[in-house]
Structures are given as C-alpha cells and as structure tokens.
Image (cartoon, coloured by chain):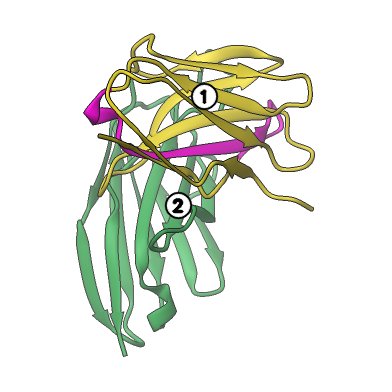
Chain colours: A yellow, B green
Amino acid sequence: DAGVTQSPTHLIKTRGQQVTLRCSPKSGHDTVSWYQQALGQGPQFIFQYYEEEERQRGNFPDRFSGHQFPNYSSELNVNALLLGDSALYLCASSLFGVDEKLFFGSGTQLSVL
Amino acid sequence: GENVEQHPSTLSVQEGDSAVIKCTYSDSASNYFPWYKQELGKRPQLIIDIRSNVGEKKDQRIAVTLNKTAKHFSLHITETQPEDSAVYFCAANEDAGGTSYGKLTFGQGTILTVHP
C-alpha cells in the first residue's frame, strides 16, 4: 500500500521563475491538501483539492495555484518565485467527508536564490 | 480563522520522565485535534488525535486530553525514550459549514529532546 509520494525531493530555482510540484495520494484517498512549512515553523495550509476542484484556500496569493487530476494526483504551481517562497512543501491526502486524518508525504524542499 | 498556540517551544527531559506539551485554540467550532511527530528531514506523522466529543484518549505511552470549555488540549508522553526526540506539532481543524474539509491550523511546534 503506497503512501503519499511527492516529487521532486529537492529543487533550486531563481527569483521570478515558475515551479511545479507533484503529489500522488495514498491509495484509496481522494483529497489532496498542500502545506508550506518554513524552517522552524508549523505547516501552513495553502489549499485543498477534491473532485478536481479547489475546495478551500489559505492566505496565499494567486501566484500559488493547483490542479487535481482524475486519478486524484495533484500539482502545486508557484509563479514569479520570491526568496520568501523557500520552504518545504508538503502534500497530504485524506478521504473526503469520511476521515479527517491527514497523511503527509516527505515533501519537496524548494530553495529560491 | 483558527489560531493555535503551542508551548513550550523546547522541552528537555531525562529518559523515563514524562513530557507534556500544551496547545490552545481560538475557534470554538473546531472539533478535531491531531498531534504530529516530525523527525529531522522526515514527514510529519500522525501519532494521536482526538475529537471534541471525547475528553481523553490513550495509545500506549501517549495520551491526549481536551478541555473544550477552556479551548486547550495537551499531549502527554510517559516513560520517554531517546527515540521520542523530535518536533511535535498540535493542530486544530476548521469546520467549514458543518462539513470538515480537513483544513488544519498547526501550532509552532515543540522540540522535544530526551536525554539517555
């Protein structure tokens, strides 16, 4: 039973560039949530996808966008990267309306230079 | 929105001692409170959770208590072991219109160090 998988594990970009992060949820899960974890901080909610739609969004600018595919996998896109976007990006999956337990992937460490 | 405060930020104990981490939340509508353990460079792992209709929950050496009136909840680890050393995060959900979409607000984390 595969857990939540994310790719890539590490990424280095420069300011102004765009990045795409990918996530495959745990087998049997249909909901994907994305979190940003700055160094020494707790994860912060970016947004959540269910049935290929964004269901909820945290306090993040429109530069952060996402997508969910029919197979429940998801992408997080960040445009016009800023130095402050450097963080660990975590994907978490769950089963909508049934169980609130979130299972996290190992994350993508994004460094913006 | 929800605000979760966690303390202490660091906690150092001797092996075999107990450790207690406390969190407060602001949104009285929150009804799900998980705790995550994150080892260095690894994913956050759910270690225990509690719902608002329960006051206490135990799982071996770990227990969580919830006081809805005071809006605070705590993690208790007994007989601590060196492998318990990690960062621990509490969280609370935001119940969106009666149907939880699983949006969690996390505390700032507690670095627990267990000395052999």
Asked whether, in this view, residue A19 is left or right of residue B11, the answer is: right
The chain to which mark 2 is attached is: B
Please provide percent x and percent y for residue A106: 52, 50
> Which residue is located at x 44 percent, y 33 percent?
A35
Q: Is residue A65 above or below residue B112?
A: above
Query: Looking at this view, is A94 or B56 the one in front?
Result: A94
Looking at the rendered structure, the secondary structure element under dot 1 is strand
Dot 2, how many residues are within 10 Å of its Cα: few (below 14), some (14-19), or many (20+)?
Answer: many
> Which residue is located at x 61 percent, y 29 percent?
A32
Q: Is residue B102 above or below residue B111?
A: above
Q: Are marks 1 and 2 in contact (CB under 8 Å)?
A: no
The chain to which mark 1 is attached is: A
Label 1 or label 2, whichever lies nearer to me, is: 1
Identify the residue under disc 1: A76
Asked whether the viewer can see residue A67, the reply is: yes
Please provide percent x and percent y for residue B31: 49, 33
**Does the magenta run of residues contain B29?**
no
Residue A59 got which mark?
A: none
Identify the residue under disc 2: B35
Asked whether, in this view, residue A87 is left or right of residue A50, the answer is: left
Asked whether the viewer can see residue B70, the reply is: no
Dot 1, how many residues are within 10 Å of its Cα: few (below 14), some (14-19), or many (20+)?
Answer: many
Query: Looking at this view, is A21 or B60 the one in front?
Result: A21
**Residue stretch rendered in magenta on the structure:** A82-101
Label 1 to label 2: alpha-carbon separation? 25 Å
Q: Is residue B114 above or below residue B112?
A: below
- Residues at discs 1 and 2 both on one chain: no
On the image, which quarter does residue B41 sit in? bottom left
Q: Amino acid at mark 1?
A: Leu
Q: Amino acid at mark 2?
A: Trp
> Which residue is located at x 57 percent, y 13 percent?
A54
